[in-house]
Image: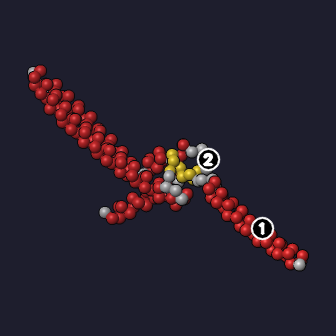
Amino acid sequence: EIQKEALYMANINYKNVIVGVIIFLLLGAVCYLMFKPQQVAVLDIESVVSSYDKALAVEKEIGEKQQELVVFLDKAKNEINKGKTEKEKAELDAKYTAEYNKKASELVEYSKKEIEAVRNDITAAAQKVAKKKTGSDVVYEIKAVVAGNVDITEDVKAELAKSNKETEAKK
């Protein structure tokens, strides 16, 4: 009788130990997943922009349009100075000022639109690469993160180049 009871108790203790070990392992796994060090995707945005063909083309085009405005202003000043009377100069000044304001406004709108398109391209590429590399689509500027990061700069450059080639092929 004592032997049966001892065996029965040992069996219960054995089951309790197994259940305890399983619970311990499950809790350990949950804690590990909750508190494991997170890898953060970082990006050197300056490096990406300075190597992105579309960004460089937009920058060049905006610069050219700004230069055209400077040339326009020089011509307008010369024309205004050719006016014979103060009234004629004031009329020319009003005419050229209105024309300049229109051109400048168009340039600002064009710049906003093109810069936003470049920003969207870079953001989409960065999120895609970050998701693949770290499991998250959150990306920080490289200068903002000290440690625990995954630099995705070169991968984003490659993704943008690939995307650019696909776009060119469609044209």
**Where is residue 86 drawn, in percent x and y?**
12, 21
Task: Name the element at disc 2.
Answer: loop
- For the view shown, which residue lies furthest in the right direction? 2
- The total of numbered circles placed on residues is 2
1 or 2: mark nearer the eye = 1
**Where is residue 32 drawn, in percent x and y?**
66, 58
Task: Name the element at disc 1.
Answer: helix
Q: Foreground residue, 5 or 84?
A: 5
The answer to whether any part of residue 23 appears in the image is: yes
Q: Which residue is drawn at 10% across and 25% down?
A: 88
Taking the image as shown, residue 156 lies to the left or right of residue 118, namely right
The answer to whether any part of residue 155 appears in the image is: no
What is the crowding at mark 2: few (fewer than 14 residues within 10 Å), some, or many (at least 20)?
Answer: few
**Where is residue 66 drawn, in percent x and y?**
29, 39
Q: Which residue in the protein does label 1 denote?
A: 17
Taking the image as shown, residue 102 lies to the left or right of residue 114, namely left
Q: How far apart are marks 1 and 2 (CA)?
A: 41 Å
Does 145 sit above or below residue 121? above
Quarter of the image that includes the C terminus: bottom left
Does 167 sit above or below residue 53? below
Query: Disc 1 marks which amino acid?
Result: Val
Q: Foreground residue, 40 or 26?
A: 26
Q: Foreground residue, 45 or 81?
A: 45
Taking the image as shown, residue 127 lies to the left or right of residue 88, namely right
Q: Are marks 1 and 2 in contact (CB under 8 Å)?
A: no
- For the view shown, which residue lies furthest in the front direction? 1
Q: Which residue in the protein does label 2 denote?
A: 147
Query: Disc 2 marks which amino acid?
Result: Ala
